[in-house]
Amino acid sequence: MQWSYPELRRRLIEAELWPEGRMARLACYLAGMAAVLFALQKLLGLFAKSWGEHLGGWVGYLIFVSAVLFSILAFRWLKRRILWRVRNRLIVTYVFIGVIPAVLLAMAFITLYGLAGQFAVFVFTSEVHSQLRSLEAANAAVSNELAARLEHGENPAAESLAGLRKRDPAWARRKVCAWYGEKPLPLCNETTGAALTRPSFVKGRFRDIVRDHDTLHLRVVTSLSLGSSSLTVITSEPFDKELVGNIAADLGEITLLASPVPAQQPATPKENKAGIVSSSGPQGTTMETDRQVLRPSFTVGTLPVATGSFDQEVLFPTPLQVVDWDTGKQWPVGAAVRTRPSVLYGHLFAALGDFVETVRFGLLFVGIFFAIIELIALIIGTRMTRTVTSAVAQLHDATKHVDRGDFSHRIPVKSHDQLADLSRSFNSMTASIEKLIQEQKEKQRLENELAIAQEVQAQLFPRQVSDLESLEVHGFCRPARTVSGDYYDFLTASSHKLILAVGDISGKGISAALLMATIHSAVRAYSVENLPQMREPVAVGAVAGAGRVMAAWPEGVEVSPGALLSLLNHQLYESTPPEKYATLFLGIYDGRSHHLTYSNGGHLPPILIGEDGAVRRLEAGGTVVGLFDNMSYEEGAVEMHPGEIFLAYSDGVTEPENDFGEFGEPRLIDIVRENRRLPLAQISQIVTMAVDDWIGDKEQPDDVTLVLARAR
């Protein structure tokens, strides 16, 4: 399916993807220019033109600028989408006011605790590595001395280190062994206990913590090349309570954790680097690796006394990887350091020396940074809270205006969130209510005028009818709206003559009622109530002029229904719009001869229902009145027998529909035929009730008019 440009633009606007603002259009233009220049660069590259090389910088610049603009637009769009709902705005406000400070404090505490623990571990491991470096330096010195003696042909013995042990008390704990080629020197036999062995995995220089015969040692290996042979010297010092206690003296309490030698194969270095967890329980501090549970081997040192309420205990574990001296594989060992921040603070600034002020400034900067973040969070949270509270206050103030009946008050809208949408809806509602009140006032005025019109129209229908000795009449009209467009009238021409008129105006409402009043006045104006009576009718002429119609009746001429319809047709044709017309039945009943002379101008043919139920229709006449000029209407005459009922009606009686169809003329005839001996008013009531039952709950579609007459 292909969309036109307006349709595509409309759909993009509905999806909020159309660039409405200046920044959005600028970003699209720059992105488009970058795409064009990139395509041009590639095209020039195909023809080996050097110009394309100069376009690369512009392409990158345009892409960068458009990316920045699109990022800003994306942030604005995301902000508008997230913060539009009041619920989300309040959640974000709570986050900035309550969650972020708590998170910052928790982060600061965790960070400080972690830094303190890491620094405590760093001090411990630094001391251990310092001992290893010192041991390596001493081993290198011994190696050089032994190499010098071997080069002079001397055979070093245990007494070679006697002077060294006397000068340095640390050598009293150390064990030294040397190999010249594959031959061990007598130097290895000077100590009690098991002698050092040279494992096969050690090739050249070595310095680490080892596990030998289920005990830990600091061990270094130095290898020197002496001609065709090599000199290997190994120095070892126990990694025991005494050594760890010297480190813990200025730090706090140190617990060394190790696992017993298992029956299974030790874990590989890669396997033992996985997650290490420490815990404290009834059995003391333990550490769990993926395969080993490290139990405390020994604890040395004491926890320093707190210098204040903030000088809390810091406990931090660290994994140590030691080398199995027999296999060369890694073995898990751990250490847990318990100390206090005051001790770590002293170690930190003692180690920094001239950088103390720099570190203090850095800590101050970190504190200021966290304070700025907290301040920004409070400002944002406060502003967002004020937007919500101010919008609610404006809505509350607006409801007071509405309560006082002031619907002209409007709420100023400055944002684009849910409360702003609510304010716009409130403004629209008050505007609609204000308009509705005006319309209600206008409607009330029209209803008052219609009520007056209804009263006036009710006066037009005959209220008191003087029946002839040989004819009783009854009329009924119920409007579908306030006023009716149906018409009926009874005019007494003489003591023995009665004019019956029944009509229906096209349309409904005021216009039909006005036309009905026009016909009513015209029929009464053209009546021959006071004219001399003659037995034979003559032609009647109509003269129009100056917007009015006059009838010229020769003296002694009797009025005919056809002539009256011709006059009314000409008047309505001249004085009404083309779409306005009427149907009209006029009949003159002579009580002496019991004859009804009539002419029907397009109305539903009235019906005569005899005593035996026979039906006669009065169809003589012509077309509707007021639609065409210069129309003539035929007349008919019938004799009404005693007991025979004259029935005239409008289409509002026979045309109402329900699920079974129209009410219909046959049903109307049957009802009148069955009740023809009842009073005319009662027959009229029975017919209207039947029509109402047929309509049901629906609105009455048209005016209901019924005229009944019965010969005596």
Image (spheres, rainbow, N blue to C red):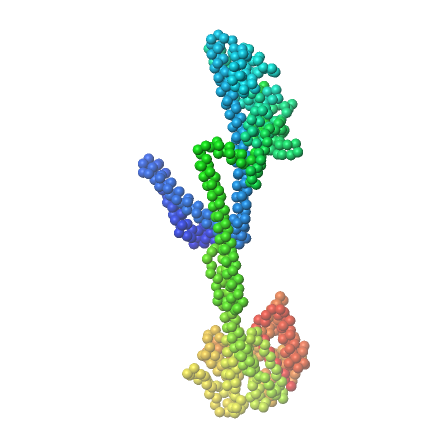
Residue at image location 46% in from the left, 35% down from the top: 356
Q: Residue furthest top?
A: 153
Q: Can you tell which quarter of the image residue 650 is in?
A: bottom right
Query: In the picture shown, does residue 538 fall above or below 212?
Result: below
The answer to whether 48 appears left or right of 669 in the picture is left
Q: Position of residue 116 (x, y in %)?
A: 53, 35
Instruction: Please indicate, yes or no, whether residue 171 appears anywhere in the rendered image.
Output: yes
The answer to whether 363 appears left or right of 273 in the picture is left
Q: Position of residue 709 (x, y in %)?
A: 61, 82
Q: Residue furthest left?
A: 50
Residue at image location 42% in from the left, 83% down from the top: 545
The answer to whether 11 appears left or right of 246 in the picture is left
| Along the viewing direction, whichever of 540 and 76 lies nearer the viewer | 76
| Along the viewing direction, whichever of 226 and 12 lies nearer the viewer | 226
Instruction: Please indicate, yes or no, whether residue 88 appears anywhere in the rendered image.
Output: no
Query: In the picture shown, does residue 187 fall above or below 585?
Result: above
Q: Position of residue 300 (x, y in %)?
A: 60, 28
Q: Position of residue 371 (x, y in %)?
A: 49, 45
Residue at image location 63% in from the left, 78% down from the top: 684
